[in-house]
Image (spheres, helix red, strand yellow):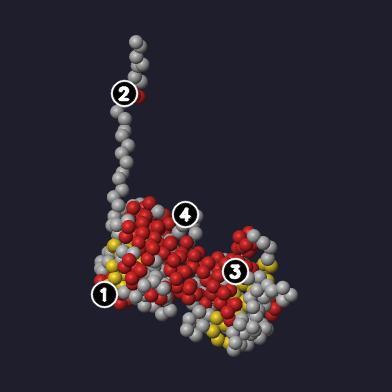
Amino acid sequence: MATTPFTKQQLLPQEEKLEILRHKSELFIGIPKETSYQERRICLTPDAVNSLVSHGHKVLIEAGAGLSSSYTDKEYSDAGAQITNDTKKIFSCPIILKVEPLTMNEIGYLNTNSIIISAIQLKTRKKEYFEALAQKKVTALAFEYIKDEDGSYPAVKSLSEIAGTASVLIASELMINNDFGKGLLFGNITGVPPTEVVIIGAGTVGEFAVKTALGLGANVKVFDNSITKLRRLQNNVQQRIFTSTIHPKSLLKALRRCDVAIGAMRGKERCPIVVTETMVEHMKKGAVIVDVSIDTGGCFETSEITTHEHPTFVKNDVIHYCVPNIPSRYSKTASLSISNILTPYLLQIAEDGGLESAIRCNKGLKNGVYLYHGILTNKAIGDWFNLPDNDINLIVF
């Protein structure tokens, strides 16, 4: 019987490829009560806590942390979380989840090398905040900087969707205000002219404001200086609506006729003022302005920051609603949204063997890191506060 001769290649020693086993890590997460003014959200819902605990992780929650989002301590306890009244004990956990950035007092409670996942709200921070975190050698992620697979920012997008939808619902409430409202129903009733709505800004907030207004039967006009954004909005809405770049004359004409004007503009530093006080003076008596852009200064010249407790004021016979952080008004919806975004990332961090391994594997998660063991890794923050920064890709690779 003939045998097949071995080739020279077959006789040479061959490399053996071994699978690298990832060691799962156990997470110990602390969730403190939110202390910032008007903040009512929480990072994880009881269902999310249950999912984490069932995967072998520990969650420690400060008593009453979920009450403003309609989640009781019992619901969290039943989901497997530990409840404590000891704030310092919460901040001694290796991982801290928080909606608002930590206060200076809270930073003082942290252990060295803690991991913080929260919002950063850069424009409200001070240089001392980052210096204090750096002294603790903290690794910090801003959830508004975390990127999805498609390059979008899921947390920012989700909260913008809430703000856009809410802006129309808030306006519909204000239009029936007994003291000053016009007594108009936000709907297309047979034989009655539809409500006229002007939306300034064609980003995610503007898009969801448009969808909600159209769903209620309103007549909508959208203004933005980006033709690309206007075209994308038209495609996403899937129907032809009035769109225009921002020209003072055409904008004034639309504002004169509208019942509701919604500000949804964004700027790199401060939101540009698009609507002057003179334009507001020409609006109908009892018209409503909802300035969602007030978080970054507002795009109406007449806008002034208000609160959830006292949300409106009247200026030039026009009702103004200028509350920052609109999603906090809908705290349960916003909490569900944040929880749905963060939970898969937390499970992935554990699956990858910890945060350091996870950010090596996930570029979008790496983009959220602005401090790595006390080293500033975000250039925008470094430039803003004149702090030395390092490229995280040169540290973690």
User: Dot 2: what SS?
Assistant: helix
Q: Earlier in the sequence, mark 4 or mark 2?
A: 2
Q: Which mark is residue 86?
A: 1
Outermost top residue: 1
Q: Residue at x 39, y 78 (%)?
A: 36
User: Dot 4: what SS?
Assistant: loop
The residues bearing labels 4 and 2 have C-alpha atoms spaced at a distance of: 45 Å
Q: Earlier in the sequence, mark 2 or mark 1?
A: 2
The residues bearing labels 2 and 1 have C-alpha atoms spaced at a distance of: 68 Å
Name the kind of residue labelled 1 in the image.
Answer: Asp
Q: Position of residue 261 (x, y in %)?
A: 62, 76
Q: Position of residue 236 (x, y in %)?
A: 61, 60
Do tag 4 and tag 1 residues touch (Cβ < 8 Å)? no
Which residue is the site of mark 2? 11
The residues bearing labels 4 and 1 have C-alpha atoms spaced at a distance of: 38 Å
Which residue is the site of mark 4? 149
In the rendered structure, the answer to whether residue 135 lies left or right of residue 381 reads left
The residues bearing labels 4 and 3 have C-alpha atoms spaced at a distance of: 27 Å
